Amino acid sequence: MNSWDITPARRALFSIIVMAGAFMAILDTTVVDVIVPKLMGPLATDMYGVQWIITSYMISAAIALLITEYLIKRFGSKKVFIAGIVAFSFASLFCGLSDTLEAIIIFRVIQGAAEALIMVTSHIMIFSYFPPKQQGLAMGIFGLGVSFAPALGPTLGGYLTEYYGWRMVFFINVPVGILLTLAGIAYLPKDTKFLKMRFNFLSLLLISIATIALLIMLSKGQQRGWFNDYYIGVLFFVTVIGYLLYALSEMFSKHKLIDFSLFKNSDFTNGILLYFFILGFSMYQYFYLLPVYYEHIKMFPTFDAGIAVFAFAVFIGIFAPIAGMLSDKIGAKRVLIMTTIVYLITSFVLLPSLNYYTPKIHAELLTIPLGISMGLFFAPATVLLLQNAPKEKGELAIVLMDYVRFVGGSFGTALATNNMEYFKNLNFNHMMELQNVSLIRDYIENLSELGGLGIDQVKAMFLNYETFMSYNYGFGNVFSAAANWAAIGAVFVALLFVKFKTKKEEKA
């Protein structure tokens, strides 16, 4: 009996439980992003200290992903999924109870590892509940969590923080986790196939060291001036050496951590690369930039900024299942072409026009095509990868997808942060070059006399205004820079339609 030979009611029940777990896990990443600046006082630290709350989570999740395939084959998806939910709920409770930075970082590490277990198992399970002809629909439903949750995070995080305090962001996961644990134990089908596998701990150690160094380098690069800093240089060196040693370990090991034979399939390779560049390098920048735009350029309160972001998040939720159904009917590749075209038009033409003077409604309308294209992206990208991976390697395909999502998302966030500062400085310098020094001096003196303020006070006010306008005009450049990575990803979408001859075909 196949895993998808179940009644529609049971399929719906299983899907709801699994999707709710994935939604809770991935939502927490962006919800916490909103509250991080508000934790400096309660945790007696600075902005660079609280950044470790995010960095520790990402590092832990990325490393835990690499052992998830082994755990699933050894213990089964259901047990690993429930273990992830329990660990995530436990860690959430103690994150909310934490009074020190060190304590919250420890429990965020547990949260991150738990998210990895939840995401991979939920992905595999929901795919198994649908017959092959409905796999696009399965990924469309799952895409509600993966695509909708990051966009909803700022709204929910802003609301909970504003009305109930930052601890509620963590506490809310506990009752949800308890319900999901009980529902999972009671209703999710048991696994019947288990494999005893040898695990390559040396390869795991080496790729973990490289991943830790890479993610710390990306999160701290802007703060330390990138390669002008010795610390960043060391991290870069450790990253490169770590990945090289990992590659050597895999070459000479009988029991490989990652089976790279998957990449012999050109569609799988192109799928991973378009996922890496379009989702990681580009889309994650917009997930990060839009809340910043509404809060710091439009100067909305946190909750209002969340509502503005929700305007495009709704369309992610609407179009994710539509993308799944379209993938089943016309094929994943054609849907990817459609969504890439919409995404490129949005990111190159519409989003760069956003600035301080853009009316709120106008700004929200301009982001709707972004929500549509994001909603249309996840299902066909996932279906493409899973259809081009052997059935017994489905878990590994999902692990690679999520690993690429974490690393690519880290790159995207770091690029967005770096570009904001770079284009702010560029626009500031341009303004300084265009200014008439004597006119500015006269203006400051007149303003000082009219307002009864000291010259230094007026100069400080004028400098703040110039800095703000530099950020304002620089944001258009930042949005355009994020679009450039999508253009690179579009190359790999186009390559999906190029027929590559195999060695056998060439000999024939």
Image (spheres, rainbow, N blue to C red):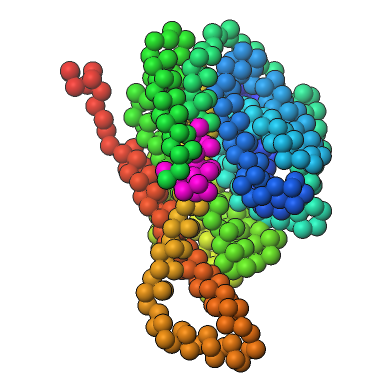
State the extent of the magenta-drawn residues as a range: 213-227
Q: Position of residue 124 (x, y in %)?
A: 58, 27
Quarter that holds the N terminus = top right
In the picture provided, is 274 more to the left or to the right than 135? left
Q: Residue furthest left?
A: 507
Determine the residue positioned at 61% across, 47% down: 48
Q: Position of residue 46 (x, y in %)?
A: 66, 49
Q: What's the magenta bit mostly, secondary-structure-wise?
A: helix
Magenta-span inclusion, residue 226: yes
Q: Nearer the viewer, residue 234 or 377?
A: 234
Determine the residue positioned at 81% across, 32% down: 178
Residue 361 appearing in the image: no
Q: Position of residue 256 (x, y in %)?
A: 46, 14
In the picture provided, is 116 more to the left or to the right than 435? right
Residue 469 appearing in the image: yes
Determine the residue positioned at 76% across, 40% down: 100
Magenta-span inclusion, residue 503: no
**96 vs 109: above or below:** below
Q: Nearer the viewer, residue 124 or 89?
A: 89
**94 vs 295: above or below:** above
Determine the residue positioned at 80% across, 36% down: 93
**113 vs 443: above or below:** above
Q: Position of residue 260 (x, y in %)?
A: 40, 21
